[in-house]
Image (cartoon, grey):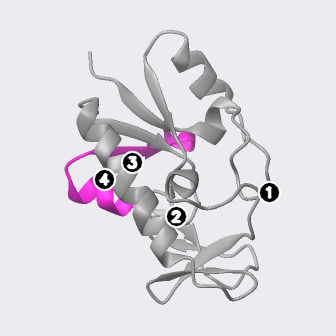
Amino acid sequence: MYMKLVSACLLGIKCRYDGKSKPDSKVLELAKIETLIPVCPEQLGGLATPRVSAEQMNGKVIAKDGTDMTEGFKRGAEEVLKLAKIYNCKTAILKQRSPSCGSGQIYDGTFSGTVIEGDGVTTKLLKENGIEVVSEEEL
């Protein structure tokens, strides 16, 4: 059986931009029967918790205050990929709509709650390296 990566916030770890978590009952149940490796790409990329919210826009990750956070998001994605390789993970369960972890859905960069098609920075890198990414909503 392969281990799976999972967004740490879905396990109740307080690592989201707002300093909170987003525990998901299906993920918590899965953790009882499978080994899940918790990751937070933003923290692994050196970003603080809490931090200003960010969304993808024009190929970059921009904070609500206008700060370009792209490099931190890229660093975090690379660290998550390293962990996937170390643990031979073939699947990741990542937080939908996140600028790092969104799978098929992300916010549009206007901070208006508008969702568009797209992948988060980490999701994109994992998929490019043959790792299946599903959201907690797809479990």
| N-term-proximal mark, 1 vs 4 | 1
| N-term-proximal mark, 4 vs 3 | 3
The reply to whether dot 4 and dot 3 touch (C-beta < 8 Å) is: yes
Distance CA(mark 1)–CA(mark 4): 25 Å
Name the front one of labels 2 and 1. Answer: 1
The quadrant in which residue 122 appears is bottom left
Residue at horizontal 59 percent and vertical 38 percent from the top: 8
Is-magenta flag for residue 8? no
Q: Where is 115 relative to 102, above or below?
A: below
Q: Position of residue 127 (x, y in %)?
A: 28, 55
Distance CA(mark 2)–CA(mark 3): 20 Å
| N-term-proximal mark, 3 vs 1 | 1
Residue at horizontal 55 percent and vertical 66 percent from the top: 99
The quadrant in which residue 69 appears is bottom right
For disc 3, the marked residue is: 80
For disc 2, the marked residue is: 105
Is-magenta flag for residue 127? yes
- For badge 3, the amino acid type reads Val
Viewed as shown, does residue 49 lie left or right of 46?
Answer: right
- The span picked out in magenta is 123-139
Instruction: State the residue in front, 53 or 75.
Output: 75
Neighbor class of circle 1 (other Cα within 10 Å; few <14, some 14-19, many 20+) is few
Name the front one of labels 1 and 4. Answer: 1
What secondary structure is marked by label 3?
helix
Q: Where is 78 relative to 34, above or below?
A: below
What secondary structure is marked by label 2?
strand
For disc 4, the marked residue is: 126
| N-term-proximal mark, 4 vs 2 | 2
- For badge 1, the amino acid type reads Asp
Distance CA(mark 2)–CA(mark 1): 20 Å
For disc 1, the marked residue is: 18
The reply to whether dot 3 and dot 1 touch (C-beta < 8 Å) is: no
